[in-house]
Image: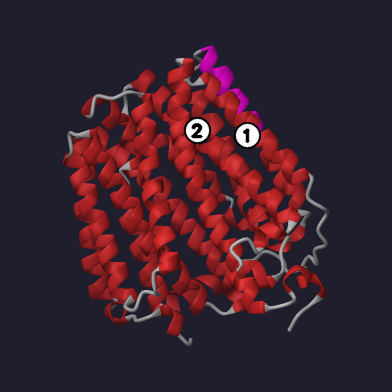
């Protein structure tokens, strides 16, 4: 039942589960998590600055969509290679090198911004940022689980989610304030580089980890096992597909600089608030889900939460008041949080242990594609039909996706309490 690796929690397994600081009691995990919060916060600040600067310089919604696309393309293209690389080499070294590359990219963006370099150079830098993140994610995630015993995994997953949302709240607000304070984006890029360097030093302080590297060669067959499982498990396929198309169509976040400047007529500080609003809603909902009893009807809750996401997206698109826009964005984050919790729990419960990594890789590609390609789709439709029609049409599309999902996979409507699942 217990092992030498579980000393801090060996006295009582149940107590370990109910200890809110279980994972944080391990020094290396603590360093890793603090580093991640700093890195994510710097990244969120940089995103706000990029959106503001590119729209100021180009006045193009299409240019905003390109921010996400430039970063996600390397992540999708390199998924197989980087995942395989993380299983064959020292994960700590890969993580550290990726952070140095992120720092270099931020400093280069600062130089381009300061000297008003060509816009295409910004996108070239973002492609390189995407390469760094493509290596950082699988290596960093794999390293993280080596820093704690199995008994603290659940607690660590909660901390990971909360730390990401916390950075998503703080980062955009700080980014907006910093753009207003400096009067330009250059200073924000330098702050982002400092954040990456801080994360580098915190991660470097982690003790070397022993890893038994598997000698399994990369092949289409090993990837196909995960894809085949998802295809055969229709409920997981339904949940992942629903998320992909809902976020692809309903993502209004990429167009926030347009709404802030042209429609709501506000400045960079308010833009920071608007970008933080979905994460504030998600953070509040995540806290509520911890204390509320488990969802009894997970299927209907998943479908209705995505319908709600579509409705609040439509209202945001039509809004001309900052307070109403902030409320709708916060609600979109809260409703998205419900669907994320249900989807992640469903995938974990129904996936056998030997396939978890490959199914997770497919899931992460779907998430990256929906978020970043959703931003590109919003930018493209906004360039063609205007920002309001882009967001309102996306919200309507999201609702239609829910109707289609419920019709194609009727079993999802009958899905009950996930904690009672035995699959």
Q: Quadrant of the N terminus?
A: bottom right
- Residue 2 falls left or right of residue 358: right
Q: Mark 1 or mark 2, which is nearer the start of the sequence?
A: 2
Q: CA distance from mark 2 to mark 1?
A: 10 Å
Instruction: Name the residue rendered at 32%, 68% in the picture.
Output: 302
Number of other residues with Cα within 10 Å of mark 2, as a class: few under 14, some 14 to 19, many 20 or more: many
Rendered image quadrant of residue 291:
bottom left
Range drawn in magenta = 102-115
Report the residue marked by disc 2. 45
Helix, strand or loop status at disc 1: helix
In the image, is residue 417 part of the stretch drawn in magenta? no
Q: Give the quadrant of residue 151.
A: bottom right
Residue 195: which numbered mark, if any?
1
| Whether residue 160 is visible | yes
Along the viewing direction, whichever of 157 and 114 lies nearer the viewer? 157
Q: Are marks 2 and 1 in contact (CB under 8 Å)?
A: yes
Q: Where residue 309 appears, x then y in whole percent?
A: 27, 55
Q: Nearer the viewer, residue 237 or 19?
A: 19
- Residue 84 seen in this snapshot: no
Q: Residues within 10 Å of mark 1 (few under 14, many from 20)?
A: many
């Amino acid at each position: 039942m217990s092992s030498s690796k579980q000393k801090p929690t060996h006295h009582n397994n149940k107590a370990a589960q109910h200890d809110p600081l279980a994972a944080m009691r391990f020094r290396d995990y603590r360093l890793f998590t603090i580093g991640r919060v700093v890195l994510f916060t710097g990244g969120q600040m940089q995103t706000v600055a990029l959106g503001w600067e590119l729209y100021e310089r180009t006045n193009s919604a299409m240019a905003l969509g390109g921010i996400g696309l430039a970063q996600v393309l390397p992540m999708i293209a390199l998924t197989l290679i980087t995942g395989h690389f993380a299983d064959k080499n020292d994960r700590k070294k890969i993580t550290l090198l990726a952070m140095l590359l992120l720092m270099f990219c931020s400093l280069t963006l600062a130089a381009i911004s300061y000297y008003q370099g060509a816009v295409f150079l910004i996108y070239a830098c973002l492609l390189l940022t995407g390469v760094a993140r493509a290596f950082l994610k699988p290596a960093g995630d794999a390293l993280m689980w080596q820093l704690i015993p199995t008994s603290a995994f659940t607690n660590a997953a909660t901390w990971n989610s909360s730390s990401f949302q916390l950075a998503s709240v703080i980062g955009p607000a700080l980014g907006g304030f910093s753009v207003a304070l400096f009067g330009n984006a250059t200073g924000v890029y330098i702050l982002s580089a400092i954040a990456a360097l801080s994360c580098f030093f915190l991660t470097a302080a982690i003790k070397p980890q022993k890893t038994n590297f598997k000698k399994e060669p990369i092949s289409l067959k090993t990837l196909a096992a995960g894809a085949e499982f998802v295809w055969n498990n229709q409920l997981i396929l339904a949940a992942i597909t629903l998320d992909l198309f809902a976020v692809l169509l309903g993502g209004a976040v990429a167009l926030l600089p347009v709404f802030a400047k042209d429609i709501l007529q506000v400045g960079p500080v308010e833009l920071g608030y608007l970008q933080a609003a979905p994460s504030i809603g998600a953070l509040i909902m995540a806290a509520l889900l911890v204390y509320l009893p488990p969802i009894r009807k997970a299927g209907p809750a998943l479908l209705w939460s995505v319908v709600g996401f579509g409705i609040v997206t439509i209202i945001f698109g039509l809004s001309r008041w900052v307070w109403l826009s902030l409320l709708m964005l916060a609600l979109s984050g809260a409703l998205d949080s419900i669907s994320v919790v249900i989807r992640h729990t469903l995938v974990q419960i129904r996936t056998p242990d030997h396939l978890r990594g490959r199914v997770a890789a497919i899931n992460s590609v779907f998430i990256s594609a929906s978020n970043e390609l959703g931003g590109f789709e919003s930018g493209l439709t906004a360039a063609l039909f205007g920002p309001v029609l882009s967001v309102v049409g996306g919200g309507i599309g999201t609702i239609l996706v829910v109707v289609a999902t419920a019709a194609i996979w009727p079993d999802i409507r009958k899905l009950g309490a996930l904690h009672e699942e035995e699959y």
